[in-house]
Image (cartoon, helix red, strand yellow):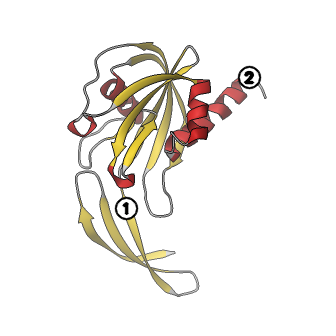
Amino acid sequence: MRTLSSTLVFRSPWLQFREDRFVRRDGSRGTYGVVDKPDFAVVIAEENGCFHLVEQYRYAIGRRSWEFPMGGWPVGSPGGSALELARAELAEETGYTAEHWEHLGHLQSALGFCSQGFDIYRATGLTPGEPSREESEADMVHRVVTETEFRAMIGSGEIVDSVTLACYARLQLHREALSGR
């Protein structure tokens, strides 16, 4: 497809929405709406067979959600590297810092309508501290769960965040590669 025009429809500090007009290989034309958001980072903070999760209210789905710590730089901010973002999000949401960081990959979050992707990091060698959450995270809860509890939370529908599930799958593949399977 070849883009013919792109019109900015909406912009906020966190995203923008554009409408593109395009032509396909066969010459037919179409219109596509795209949400542009900066990439974000997800942290699988792991120690002693346990994961650090955060729970917060997610307005778009009208309920609270358990997730791995994650977040992004605001649109237009100077930002930093994906690893710097992961470190900042872990400290902000849980108060923890990590001695060891492993990059487990980069995925796309909703490629049917959104340009945003995310980097997955495994953090180990954790040291506790005080979280410094943003105003929108004031009701956030931090909890440490065993991997067995984590899997039960998936099965019971307590964990519904697709990004958290994709990151867990990526972690499983990483573990299998390390074990030579």
* Direction from residue 125 to residue 8 in the image, left or right: left
Residue drawn at (28%, 17%) of the image: 130
SS at badge 1: strand
Q: As drawn, which residue projects farthest toward the front? A: 156
Q: Which residue is mark 1?
A: 35
Q: As drawn, is 57 to the left or to the right of 149?
A: left
Of residue 82 and residue 136, the one placed in the foreground of this image is: 136
Q: Are marks 1 and 2 in contact (CB under 8 Å)?
A: no
Label 1 neighbour load within 10 Å: few <14, some 14-19, many 20+? some
Residue 76, placed above or below residue 170? below
The quarter in which the C terminus is drawn is top right
- The location of residue 13, given as percent across then percent down, is 23, 51
Rendered position, 6 above or below 174: below
Q: How many marks?
A: 2
Reply above or below: 48 against 114: above
Residue lying at 67% horizontally and 34% vertically, measured from the top left: 173
Amino acid type of the residue that numbered disc 2 sits on in the rendered structure: Ser
| Residue drawn where x is 70% and y is 24% of the image | 178
- In the picture, measured across the screen, residue 166 lies left or right of residue 93, that is right
Q: Which residue is found at the position 37% from the left and 18% from the top?
A: 96
Q: Position of residue 16 (x, y in %)?
A: 29, 60
Residue 22 appears in which quarter of the rendering? bottom left
Quadrant in the picture for residue 49: top right
Left or right: 3 in relation to 132: right
* Numbered badge on residue 179: 2
Q: Can you give x and y, in whole percent of width and height, for residue 34 in the image? A: 39, 66
